[in-house]
Amino acid sequence: MRILVVEDEVILREGLSDLLEGAGHEVVAVGDGLIAVERGVGEAFDMVVLDWMLPRLEGPEVCRRLRLARPGLPVLMLTAKGDERDKVDGLHAGADDYVTKPFSPRELLARVEVFARRLKAAPAPAEVIEEDGAALDLSRCVVVRDGHEEALTAREVGILRWLWRHRGRAVTRAELLEHVWGLSPNLETRTVDVTIMNLRKKIERDAKAPRLIVSVKGIGYSFGALR
Ligand code: CA
């Protein structure tokens, strides 16, 4: 599996990476909640091992945001407390399972293997959106149009995934900032417009007359035209 490990303590993060790689998994390890959301939303992972206490954005909130953008992504939460209330909060945020620190390597691997077996039994479907002559392959982070393939950034994939998931309604810039950037929606929204302008050049037949990411006056954007 391709696993995103989110843990701010360096020794534990490296230990987890070694352990999971030793068991044959591919690991991307990060130490910060916001970066975790950015990578987890924009890239293809089979599961996330997520620490509870993290800088910038805590584990349950990371889990909640990942869940919004990638509903099927399994999350195994690490908690130092083992407190019943925390367990309930975390499950509420959408975690699938728990390991209480300190845990044994064997215990963690056993939990991860449960997810690996589930994935083998029911592999995640490829995420390809075909629209207006473009194939947006979100799992591979590429767009193919007229036989030409171009790479999409993690952020661009995050935007597409969010708009697609909410197609049929207008999505605000503040919403994109919060869920794709992981930033406070009160911040500058011009960033969103600039990113979408560049994304349109990659995916639209004519970036000046966009049909995939359509502007909704006074609100933001929608995937395709709203009826
Ligand atoms: Ca921590």
Image (cartoon, rainbow, N blue to C red):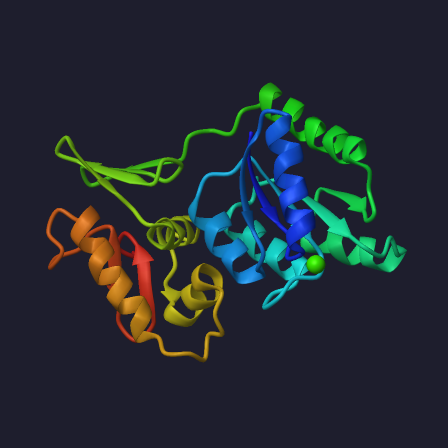
Q: Residue furthest top?
A: 121
Q: Is residue 132 visible?
A: yes
Residue positioned 57% across, 60% down in the render: 32
- In the rendered image, residue 8, in percent from the top left (x then y), is placed at 64, 57
- 113 w.r.t. 88: above or below: above
Query: Among all residues in the image, which is located at the extreme front?
Result: 11
Given residues 168 and 137, the one toward you in this image is 137
Instruction: Tell me which residue sits at (73%, 31%) in the image.
Output: 109
**Foreground residue among 183 and 36:** 36
Q: Quadrant of residue 118?
A: top right
- At x 37%, y 40%, the residue is 138
Q: Which quadrant holds the N terminus?
A: top right
Q: Nearer the viewer, residue 140 or 172?
A: 140
Give the left or right position of residue 73, taking residue 144 as reference: right
Which quarter of the image is occupied by the C terminus?
Answer: bottom left
Where is ligand 1, by quadrant? bottom right
Picture coordinates of residue 212 (x, y %)? Answer: 24, 50
